[in-house]
Amino acid sequence: MINFDYLISKFILKWSYKKGLDLRENI
């Protein structure tokens, strides 16, 4: 059985990290 909560939280962390990098580059 796949742990969706784990996958989703991992995806959100990766996405928010990437977003944070993008925001820093844009400033």
Image: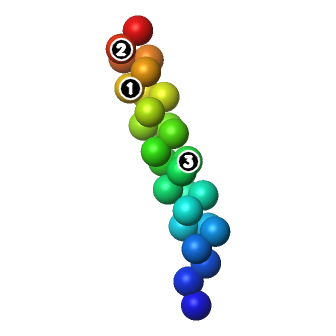
Q: Secondary structure at mark 2?
A: helix
Q: Which mark is residue 9?
A: none
**What is the CA distance from the residue labelled 1 to the residue labelled 2?**
6 Å
What residue is disc 2 on? Answer: 26
Q: Quadrant of the C terminus?
A: top left
Answer above or below: position of 14 versus 9. Answer: above
**What is the CA distance from the residue labelled 1 to the residue labelled 3?**
14 Å
* Residue 18: quarter of image: top left
Query: Which class describes the residues within 10 Å of circle 2: few (<14), some (14-19), or many (20+)?
Result: few
**The residue positioned farthest toward the top in the image shown:** 27
Question: Which numbered disc flags the more N-terminal residue, 1 or 3?
Answer: 3
Is there a contact, CB below 8 Å, between mark 1 and mark 3?
no
Q: Secondary structure at mark 3?
A: helix
Residue 23 in the image: state x and y as whole percent. 43, 21
Question: Which numbered disc flags the more N-terminal residue, 3 or 2?
Answer: 3
Amino acid type at image mark 3: Leu
What residue is disc 1 on? Answer: 22
The residue that appears at 36% across and 17% down in the rendered structure is: 25
* Residue 26: quarter of image: top left
Amino acid type at image mark 2: Asn
Residue 20 in the image: state x and y as whole percent. 48, 28
Query: Which class describes the residues within 10 Å of circle 1: few (<14), some (14-19), or many (20+)?
Result: few
The residue that appears at 58% across and 74% down in the rendered structure is: 4
Is there a contact, CB below 8 Å, between mark 1 and mark 2?
yes
**What is the CA distance from the residue labelled 3 to the residue labelled 2?**
20 Å
The residue that appears at 48% across and 48% down in the rendered structure is: 14
Colour mode of the rendering: rainbow
Answer above or below: position of 3 versus 17. Answer: below
Residue 7 in the image: state x and y as whole percent. 54, 67
What residue is disc 3 on? Answer: 13
Q: Quadrant of the N terminus?
A: bottom right
The residue that appears at 55% across and 47% down in the rendered structure is: 13
